[in-house]
Each structure stands twice: as C-alpha cells, then as structure tokens.
Image (tube, rainbow, N blue to C red):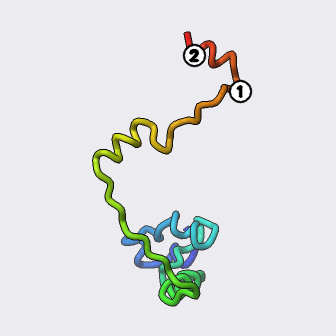
Amino acid sequence: MQEPCRSCPEKTKDFGGCRCQTYMLTGDATNADPVCDLSPKHHVITEVIDKAQNPSQPVTVHPIVFRDDNWYDWARAGGFFSRPSRPSRYPARSAAAAR
C-alpha cells in the first residue's frame, strides 16, 4: 500500500479505497484512490465530477423500454442472435455436424 494510504488512520475502515476505481481513473491500481481527499490524484475525481455536472455537449436521455414475454420468446427463438443462412466456410465440419 502506497502513501498516504499506508499511514492513514482510516485504512482500517476503507482498506485503501477501491482498486478497480483507482485503475479506471488513474491507470494504476496501486495508486491511492482518487476519491480520497488525501490522494495526490484527487484532482482527477474532482475534474470528472465537474465535467459530469457541467457537460459541454447536451446529454441524450433514452427511456427504459420494457419488453413483454412475446419479445423474450422471439429472442430465444433466434431473434437478432440467429446466424445467417449461408454456406459454411468449413464444409468438413458441417458434414460431420449433420450426421
């Protein structure tokens, strides 16, 4: 554990912060979590928060679309996930699979 986490009295409560979050924000999971005020990389999280609160481009909101049971039946039957009907590039495998 690096400083300031190594000598921090809060390390027994937060265990040095979130490693995944630290990696995502700083590119190095061994850094101090930038969410912590004591972190030398704390400016990273404050910049992200400012950018989220004051977007330079308009935010597009997409409504949640609820599907009914018929949609799930269609998806299970192949839906978007079905393979296109075309000849196999591997005829030997297709012949073996057909037996």
Residue 39 visible in the snapshot: no
Give the labeled residue for mark 2.
97
Q: Residue at x 57, y 76 (%)?
A: 3
Residue 9 visible in the snapshot: yes
Q: Is residue 71 above or below residue 65?
A: above
The residue most toward the top is 99
Q: Residue at x 47, y 70 (%)?
A: 16
Quarter containing the N terminus: bottom right
Give how far across and how far down residue 98 sits, in percent: 56, 14
For the residue marked with disc 1, what is the amino acid?
Arg
Graded by Cα atoms within 10 Å as few (under 14), some (14 to 19) or many (20 or more), the crowding at tag 1 reads few
For the residue marked with disc 2, what is the amino acid?
Ala
Q: Residue at x 32, y 59 (%)?
A: 66
Q: Is residue 46 above or below residue 84?
A: below
Residue 47 - label: none
Look at the numbered disc 1 and give the secondary structure of its residue.
Answer: loop
Between the residue at mark 1 and the residue at mark 2, the CA separation in whole angstroms equals 14 Å
In this view, the residue in front, 60 or 38, is: 60
Give how far across and how far down residue 87 sits, in percent: 66, 26
Q: Specify whether 76 is left or right of 87.
A: left
Give the labeled residue for mark 1.
89
